[in-house]
Amino acid sequence: MANIYRSMIPSRSAAAVIGSAFTLAAALSSLDAAAQAYPSRTVRIVVGFPAGGPTDIVSRLMAQRLSERLGQSFVVDNRPGAGGVLATEQVVKSAADGHTLLMGTIGGLTVSQHLLAKMPYDTLRDLAPITQAVSNTNIMVLHPSLPVKSVKEFIALARARPDALTYASSGNGTITHLSGELFKLMTQVRMTHVPYKGGAPALTALISGEVGLSFENALIVIPHIRAGRMRPIAVTGARRTQALPDVPTMEEAGVQGYQATGWYGLLAPVAVPQEVLAKLHAESVQILRSRDVADKLAAMGSEAIGNTPAEFSAFIRSEAEKWGKVVRAAGMKPG
């Protein structure tokens, strides 16, 4: 009887296996419960540019829809500076509970690593990509005082006045900066770069005539183009935008091989639980694929994306490689 009783008691190794299984099940149950409870308070979406710029506008649209779907407030926290690096660093150092997110951009995520001698973070080591939110159309726009109406005429003017023409950007390392550097590289013109702390102040400078041109996001320039406050001469992406169908692409305008597209995407600190990241991904993709949001973004010159975390991660890597080559070819030195 004692032998039979002993045979019913698990061996020490079997007991360990059973204990581990119970521990794993408890951990999974705990994580699932955490995901179900998320979000438990207000969620911040940190944006590296001032209010009123294109990143801010897209972030506020996403915040509104996430609030509606998840029953907690999602708010935009504008932390401008260093082309998005300051905002990215803040998110990297925040608590990994999913209540602080980043609307990351090309500058802070891929370009700054080639421009700064010392980066305060490693994008794909310290951040978990959730989804690319949008791909943006940028437009080469001129102040009406410049006496040109095409890219060909602009190149002739710039060559006749080397370094005299100034172009605004939303900060060092941003797509509006890199678009200008790529244009200079491919057309062999000399222009002077004037960085601002975001798209909104750069736009103000262009409207006032403080600078002569910009490679700015369609989302914020289209109303001013229609009002006659600036003149569009080319789209920087691979195809025309439905918002301004008569404006040619840079390739159509004669700069063969030119393509510069901006984008934004949601990321979180890397240690955020996978179940929370999965929930954020699923909800964000549903929003971006909804007809009303996609149409609203398209009318502003942006394309809703909503890809997988793996696809977004691979895209970030490819963009870092692409723009690193431009930085080196243009002779832009780390600072």
Image (cartoon, rainbow, N blue to C red):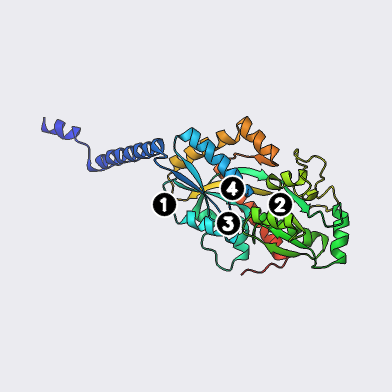
- Name the mark on residue 84: 3
Q: Which residue is mark 4?
A: 56
Q: Which image quarter is the N terminus in?
A: top left
* Residue 216, numbered label: 2
Instruction: Tell me which label, 1 or 4, sits earlier in the chain.
Output: 4
State yes or no: discs 3 and 4 in contact (Cβ < 8 Å).
Answer: no
- Distance Cα–Cα, label 3 vs label 2: 16 Å
Disc 2 packing (10 Å; few <14; some 14–19; many ≥20): many
Answer with the quarter of the image where residue 143 lies. bottom right
- Alpha-carbon span between mark 1 and mark 4: 22 Å
The front one of 65 and 276 is 65
Percent from the top left, x then y, of residue 172?
Answer: 64, 62
Say which element carries label 4: helix
The residue lying toward the viewer, choosing from 263 and 273, is 263
**Residue 95: which disc?**
1
Label 2's element?
Answer: strand
